[in-house]
Image: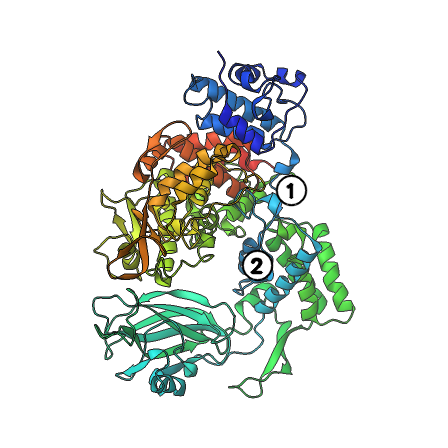
Amino acid sequence: MRWPIRCCVSLLWLCGGTCSDSSQELAANNDLVAFFAQHCVDCHGASEPEADVRLDALALQGSEPANRPDWAQIVAVLDASEMPPADHPQPTPQAVAAAIRGISRHAAETRQASSSALRRMNRREYQNTVHDLLGIDVPLLDLLPADGSVQGFDNVADGLSISSVLMEQYLEAANVAFDAVIRRIEPLPAETRRADLMEIKDNIDSVAKQKGGTIEVDDSFVKFTPGWPPARIDTAHPIEDGVYRCRVAVWPHDAGERTLSLAIYVGSLFGPETRKFIGIYDVTGTADEPRVIEFVTHMKEGHSIHLLPRIWPEHVTWRDKHEPRPGVGIVWAETHGPLDQSFPSEAQRRLFGNPSSITMVPDKPIYMRHRKGVKLHIVASSQPREDAIRILREFIPRAFRRPVSDAEMQPFVDLTVSRLEAGRSFEQAVRTGVTAVLCAPQFLLLNARADVDEYTMASRLSYFLWSTMPDETLLELAAAGQLRDPAVRSAQVQRMLKDPRVDAFVENFTGQWLDLREIEFTTPDAKLYPEFDPLLQTAMLEETHRFFRHVLQQNRSVLDFVDADYTFLNERLATHYGMEGIRGNELFEKIALPEASIRGGVLTQASVLKVTANGTTTSPVLRGVWMLDAMLGRTMPPPPPGVPAVEPDVRGATTIREQLAKHSSDNSCAVCHRRIDPPGFALDQFDAIGGQREWYRSIGEGERIEGNKSYRRGPDVQPAGTLPDGREFADFREYRSLLMSKPRSLARAMATKLLIYGMGRRVTVADREVVDDVVSQSEAADFGLQSMIEAIVSHHAFEAP
């Protein structure tokens, strides 16, 4: 008797799998052909194949692409024990493993050039690299278009095309970066500018007219909400650009048992300009002895410090009489600076050097409100040709991240000199050369060389873990020819993970792997989730970032992402999770989770649960698809054309499970939903903002809740399900236990995500053996995340073109 693989077949049909008519090609791999013949061809042979898919004639040789979805799906169903169905006799694990190896080796042999890691920088890498190269900190991200995403990441070669329009945008960004290098005005001596809030007319007027309910208490301006009006600190605004030490004196007014917090931003007072987030601070002290919050940041002329109260539980309004209204008293604010007094700027000295031939020359006058007779300066040289050539020859090797021959530099030098000969100023000529370098293929492209040398290895390491150019240590190791040694590369991983620049890896990787970049994409419905506030959302992100960073730097197992007995919480998030004993929102604590807690791992973290919901309610489909991709490495095909989406009923008339039961009665839908729905049902124990629940919230039908006028009690949650391999679970805890029973599958999925991100190219079934090598090498450290990264960078695949 031979056994069908209906699961595999249906997925192949949905993905548009096709078959070759050439049976001769099958003879190249007798073992694999025999496996299909024994387990598949009765149902999927030449005679009326199920779902019109023939597995007796799949081409094993020739020009078939390595990333054909049929091969990937076959491997997926084999790996997940979904083939044959649970009610049929099963092939041995050894036979399944041999079949997967055969498919992987065939795909590796026929890999096409599209799998090359040749790519340009994405826009975040471009900004970071230009910042580090020039020593500046000017926003460039919004000047460049969003990058394409492939296999979930925006640093994959196939999604990073280059066009003439993009090159124009790179040129604009390069010119903005060049302008940021030069300090045009000689700075005033550092001074302190102070604002006593109740001496400022706008604040006095706000209190007098009760704008936003603001009041004056003990010579302090008391704000109750983050909204209008702003706390005006005009007399503390910087009068010129620079780095400033900022201080704010605050205290809690009628806090009661609450912890009052303050979100601080820096930016323009009005308008659409994006403001820089400084942090969340707890408000303590008294009106006589307020807390003084201090920080250092770059500010532009006229920019303000924005002070936004974060008060939870929800605000007590001025109409309420049952308790005093909590607010944040602001006594004074001040700025001291500019602290960076160098003129020329340090960035200019770095680019232009500091020979006596180069000077700053006054040029055009500029109007400044607080300074008279000010002129902008330009960079001039008494020997422009010699200085321009020197600057380009020093700059190009740093920009290209490798030694550069005179012949390769000459076009950029000639371009710069031609501008001088055409009558342009020294600064204009240098600008032309520098911006041309910042738009050159040698700067923009990573892994550009056919021969992967040590300098390419240095860049691969730095853009993997830092999203920016290599530092001096990496370049020195490359110059010494030591980065060919896997042990040296592994040691560099350990060093680099201790550097603050690793924050770029934490944010960029989790932002895409866990979709955390979408945290602000939806705003939870205020009626269904009245307890949601910005303080909670900030805490959501911080928990996941701190958790990932801890796993990374402590070399904890990647299995912690599925189940861990600890997390990082502040008071706001702990309260949301129903935990007590944590005070304060400014600092996060690593806490041991109670044994009875359902929390543990990223699957139960509110950030992940929010981005996998639609803002109004949850969908097992959305969460199921996310779960399969992010944690199990299973990318599901899109639904067939014309199939309507299943939307949860917030009126409470039907449950999402009832709707899915009808939806999945269609065979074309049922195939995928038997994989998607079970993890979605398990995660349904958490609402759209990550709260644990036993029933859905409804704004229509349902039982009234005493004291709650916002929503009603809807139908009960039904978190039970059955996996495609026949295993059953009653709730999320049991589902998580089933996941943890197959640790290598979880580790393999994580290794695949890291390989995609770290190598900047697609990872397909052709890379199966590479993934397995990485998993096996990290297994001795219990699949430690750091060990997994070390295994990737020390693998021979990391040296491939």
| Spatial separation of the CA atoms under disc 1 and disc 2 | 21 Å
Q: Earlier in the sequence, mark 1 or mark 2?
A: 2
Please give the residue where the numbered disc 2 appears in the rendered image: 130
The relative height of residue 636 versus residue 651 in the rendered view (above or below) is above
Residue 487 relative to residue 17: left or right? left
In front: 217, or 141? 217
Task: Look at the image and tell me whether residue 488 can be seen.
Answer: no
At label 1, which amino acid type do we have? Arg
In the rendered structure, which amino acid carries the disc numbered 2?
Val
Near-viewer residue (784 or 222): 222
Q: Residue at x 34, y 34 (%)?
A: 740
Please give the residue where the numbered disc 1 appears in the rendered image: 449
What kind of element bears circle 2? helix
Neighbour class for label 1 at 10 Å: few (<14), some, many (≥20)? few
**Side of 171 where 73 appears, left or right:** left
In this rendering, the count of numbered labels is: 2
Q: Seen from this angle, which residue lies furthest top?
A: 1
Residue 11 can be seen, yes or no = yes
- Work out which residue is located at the far right of the displayed protein and give it: 422
